[in-house]
Image (cartoon, rainbow, N blue to C red):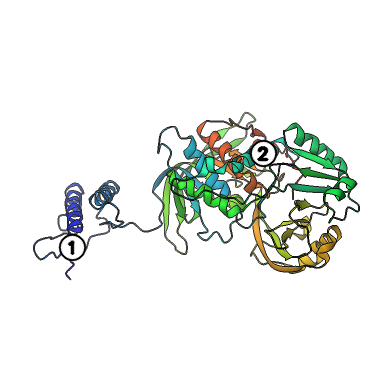
Amino acid sequence: MVIVFNKTMMTAWRLVARACSAINRRSSVPSHVYCTSVALSGSRSFSTGTAVRKDFFKGADVESYVKDFREKARAINPGSDWHPLHLTPGLPPERTDILIVGGGVVGWSIAYWLKKKERIRDGVRVLVVEKDPTYSQASTVLSAGGIRQQFSMPENIHLSMASADFMRNINEHLSVLNEDPVDLQFNHSGYLFLASENGAEIMEENYRIQRSAGAKVTLLSPTQLKEKFPWMNTEEVVLASYGLENEGWFDPWTLLNAFRRKAMSMGVFQCFGEVTGFKYRTHSMMTEDGDLVDLTRIRYVNVRMPNSLEYQPVECAIVVNAAGANAGEVAKLAGIGSGPQDTIGAIPVPVEPRKRFIYVLHCPDGPGLDAPFVIDYSGVYFRREGLGGNYITGMSPEEEEEPATTDLEVDHEFFQEKIWPHLANRVPAFEKLKVTSAWAGYYDYNTFDQNGILGLHPLVNNMYFATGFSGHGLQQSPAAGRALAELILDGGFRTLDLSALGFQRILSNRPALERNIV
C-alpha cells in the first residue's frame, strides 16, 4: 500500500518515528517487538512493520509522548484538526480537578462559577459529564421555565432574587466574544398565587417573610383582583399574592446553552457519557458516641460512553453530584445509604425522580398580555405561552396518585379529569379550549423537605451535592451554582448563607419545609 504525503504530514510522521524510537529505547519490551516503523524516502511509502504486543507500552510514559505528538502536529499545521495519533472521540480526559455529574443548568452554572472564581487562569480543571447528548429527557428543557420569589423560606427567596438579578444582566456575565448576545425572552409578568379561606393565613405569613427578605410582593383582595384581572372568576378566592418584579418566565434552553457556551469558552471540558461507578478508598473511625462509621474518598469516576460498553476512568479530586432526578442513584454508587442499619451511613440521599405533565392549550378568547403566571389554590397553574392565545398548564398530583417514572408518556386523562375543571372554573374562557400538544418531564423531588441540598456529604469527603430542588432548580441555578463554587473554592458560603440547605438537617432529621411548592 502506498500513501502520498504532503510536506506537513511528512514532518508529523517523522515526529512519530522519532518518538516511537524513543519509546522503544526507554521501554522494557524485547528487541523483536518494536514500534511502527516509518519510511519517508523518495517513494514516500511506509511499512507498518510487525504486530505490536499488547504489553508494548508497559513501562513507557505513553501519555506524555502522545501529548507531545499532538502539540507538535498542531504547531506544524495550525488551523487543521489532523493528528498523527487519534484518541477515541468523545472520551473524557483521564484526569481532572473537579468532575461534575450532570450537564443540566445547575451543573453548567457550577462549572461557570468555578472558572469565574479561579485565581489563576486554567488553575482549576473542570469536567462536566452529561448522559443525554440530545437533552431530550433533561429536566431543564422540559420545565415550565418560571421564576419567582414567593417562597416561605428566606434561603429560597434570596436564591431566586439573586438569580433574577443575574438573568436581568445576563450578558454582563455570560456573553462570549464574537457570539450573539443572550436573549432569555424573559417575560416579567409576575406570579399570582390565589388562596382560599384555608390558605389565607399561611399566605399572609409567607408575605411577611418575603417582604422582610426584600422581595417586591403585594397582597390583593378579591375586589382588587377582579379589577386588575377582569377575565378571572374570583369566587372563593379570599386573598391573592402578586409579584411586582423579578418574577415571570423565560426560555430554559437558552439559559442552559448560555451557561454551557460561556463555561466552555473559559476552558471547561464537556463529555457525553454516563457515570456508572466510583473507585474509592474507605477507612473506619469511631464517633464521640461510640459509633463506627466509614469515611470514603473518591479517587476515580467511571464514565461509560453513549451506546457503548467502553468506559473511561477519570481521576479527580472533587466530585459534584448535580445529577438532578438521578442524584440519589448516583449517590448509591459511592456507597451512600448502604451503611449499617441505624447509623448515618444508612441514610440515603432523599432525592428521586417525579414525573410531571405539561399541556399546551389554545384558547383565542383567553387572557391577554396582562396574564401572569397563575397558581390556583387547587394546585393548577397556567401561564401564557407566546402570543396568539396559547398557554401551558399543569398540576402536581396527590402523593398516592404519583405516576410511574419508567417512561415519559403523557396521561391525557389527567388533564381532562384533574386540570380542566379547575381551569374552566377560574377562567370562564377556558371552557372552550383545545389541547394542541403535551410533554412530560422529570424533576428532582426531595422527599425529605422539598428543598435543595447544597453541600458536602459528611461521609464522602470529596462529593458535593447540588440537587433536590423539587421543581425550582432552574430558576435558582445561577445563585446555587455560585454558592457551591464558593463552598468548594473558598471553603464556605460567602454571598448567601445557605447552611440551612446542607446535609446536617437530613442526618439530624430536622426538615426545613418549604410551604410554597408548585
Q: Quadrant of residue 208?
A: top right
State the residue lying farthest toward the left. Answer: 42
State the residue lying farthest toward the bottom. Answer: 1
Residue at the spot 66% in from the left edge and 67% down from the top edge: 409
Check disc 1 and give the amino acid type: Phe
In this image, 505 relative to 122: left or right? right
Residue at the spot 67% in from the left edge and 55% down from the top edge: 144
What is the CA distance from the residue labelled 2 to the residue labelled 1? 60 Å
Q: Which of 457 and 451 is in front in this view?
A: 451
On the image, the x and y values in percent for residue 242 come to 78, 44
On the image, the x and y values in percent for residue 433 come to 78, 67
**Label of residue 5 in the image:** 1
Label 1 crowd (10 A; few <14 / some 14-19 / many >=20) = few
Kindly indicate whether the residue at mark 1 contacts the one at mark 2 (C-beta within 8 angstroms): no
Q: In which quarter of the image is residue 459?
A: top right
In this image, 275 relative to 429: left or right? left
Determine if residue 294 is in view.
Answer: no
**Label of residue 60 in the image:** none
On the image, the x and y values in percent for residue 341 come to 65, 44
Mark 2 or mark 1: which comes first in sequence?
1
Q: Nearer the viewer, mark 2 or mark 1?
A: 2
| SS at mark 1 in the image | loop
- Residue to which mark 2 is pinned: 161
